[in-house]
Amino acid sequence: MQIALERRGDYSVRAVIDLARHYGDGRRKAREIATVMDIPVRYLPQLLAPLVRRGLLVATAGPEGGYALARDPASISVLEVIEAVEGPLESPRCVLRGGPCDWDETCPLHETWGRARNALAGELGRTTFAELAMADQAIQNRPVRPRKSPHLESVERLGVRDGNAGVRPSRRSART
């Protein structure tokens, strides 16, 4: 089983983290956000449009335009952003049967799954982009430590930022 964001959700969360890190600094160009957060620049306006429609972002067209958060990042939850781009966490599909959930014939997992979904929604609703921006800054500032075991395969972290914004290390250099 995998519980993960779709690509739209992933990219949107990354973009809002970048905007939260630059909150109060003025508008950010789509190219800046895309480069720093490793998001395809041509895809970014499509991703951010639902966030603008929901009033989470402000978009200004033109040479001096760009994107900015419409509210303080401490007042924007991860749940708001995810649901704006991916839809509600609730699904009309039964976890076991795959079809619509029928209240007359609920599956044995129905109540447990509902509580788990509510717990996830609660945590995402409590987590703000101010918190994520601070965590992202801390990750960026953390010194790179060598892996403890030479037997473990190195995994490249996408979206890593350093002095060369948007440049990913090669697989060979990521293992050193």
Image: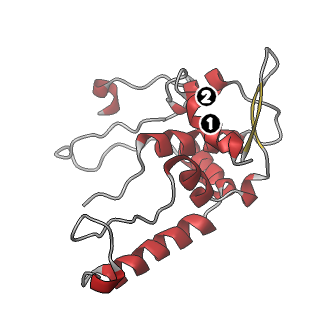
Instruction: Give the amino acid type for the residue marked by disc 1 in the picture.
Output: Leu
How far separated are the C-alphas under marks 2 and 1? Answer: 5 Å
From the image, which quarter does the N terminus lie in? bottom left
Q: Residue shown at 20%/43% (left/top)?
A: 150
Work out whether residue 97 or residue 145 is closer to the camera in this orientation and state it. Answer: 97
Residue 170 place in picture, x, y as percent:
34, 23
Numbered disc total: 2
Question: In the shown orientation, is residue 78 left or right of residue 52?
Answer: left
- Could you tell me which secondary element the residue under label 1 belongs to? helix
Q: Residue under label 1, please give it.
A: 48
The quarter holding residue 64 reads top right
Residue 133 place in picture, x, y as percent:
64, 49
In the picture shown, does residue 71 fall above or below 91? above
| Residues at marks 2 and 1 touching, judged by CB atoms closer than 8 Å | yes
Residue 8 disc label: none
Question: In the shown orientation, is residue 56 left or right of residue 166?
Answer: right
Residue 48 place in picture, x, y as percent:
62, 36
Question: In the shown orientation, is residue 99 left or right of residue 74?
Answer: left
Residue 45 disc label: 2
Q: Residue shown at 54%/33% (left/top)?
A: 37
Work out whether residue 139 or residue 68 is closer to the camera in this orientation and state it. Answer: 68
